[in-house]
Amino acid sequence: MSDLLRALDARPTGERARIDFDAGGLVGTRCTGCGWVMWPERAGCARCGEVDLERYALPADGVLHTWTRVWVPAEGIEPPYVLGMVRLGDVRVFAHIRELTDELTVPAPVRITVCESAHPQFWFTPAGRS
Ligand SMILES: [Zn+2]
């Protein structure tokens, strides 16, 4: 078995960190071999196969590149709600967007909020809003 497969077997994906509630942001991994940043945390590099990865805190501020209003209910979430593609440094995150107005033009700066007791546990709002 390769080092990559051994590492992948070590922890199921569901047990890997996604959010650092104490730091107030998302956490992923950065490859020590090629520098590729991944979110959520991974056991091996998706680009070069390296298994020596380090924990990496994604920035709190990002850029919303596109969004859509969803009219179908999701578990615990009543429609309508907004989902969008946010770039956080080198990583793209598909996430809930709150306090968005139809007048907002993209790309637009956004900031993350995390809350362990909320559902979903993180979302983005346009910069300048809470
Ligand atoms: Zn790599």
Image (spheres, rainbow, N blue to C red):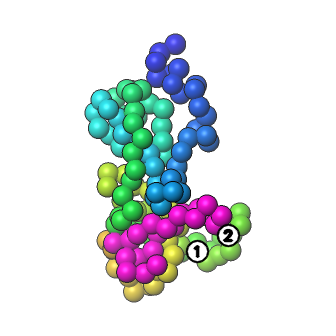
- In the rendering, at what x and y percent does residue 94 appear? 48, 59
CB of mark 2 within 8 Å of CB of mark 1? yes
The kind of secondary structure element at disc 2 is loop
How far apart marks 2 and 1 lie (CA) works out to: 8 Å
Amino acid type indicated by mark 2: Ile
In the rendered image, which quarter is residue 66 located in?
Answer: bottom left
**Residue 39 in view in this figure:** no
| Residue 51 location, quadrant | top left
Q: Residue at x 37, y 76 (%)?
A: 127
Looking at the image, which residue sits at the far right?
76
* Badge 1 amino acid: Tyr
Mark 1 closeness class: few <14, some 14–19, many ≥20 residues within 10 Å? some
Relative height, residue 52 to residue 95 (above, below):
above
Q: Is 96 inside the magenta-drawn segment?
A: no
Pinpoint residue 125: horizontal percent, then vertical percent.
Answer: 45, 74
Q: For the magenta stretch, what is the residue range? A: 109-130
Residue 71 is left or right of residue 91, and the answer is: right
Q: Where is 32 relative to 101, above or below?
A: above
Percent across and percent down for residue 53 are 40, 33
On residue 81, which mark appears? 1
Q: Residue at x 43, y 62 (%)?
A: 85
Query: For this rendering, which residue is in front, 70 or 124?
Result: 124
In the rendered image, residue 27, in percent from the top left (x then y), is placed at 45, 49
Q: Is residue 120 left or right of residue 40?
A: right
- Name the residue located 49 percent from the left edge and 46 percent from the top edge: 40
Q: Secondary structure at mark 1?
A: strand
57 w.r.t. 3: above or below: below
- The residue drawn where x is 28% and y is 33% is 34
Q: Which residue is mark 2?
A: 77
Label ID, residue 127? none
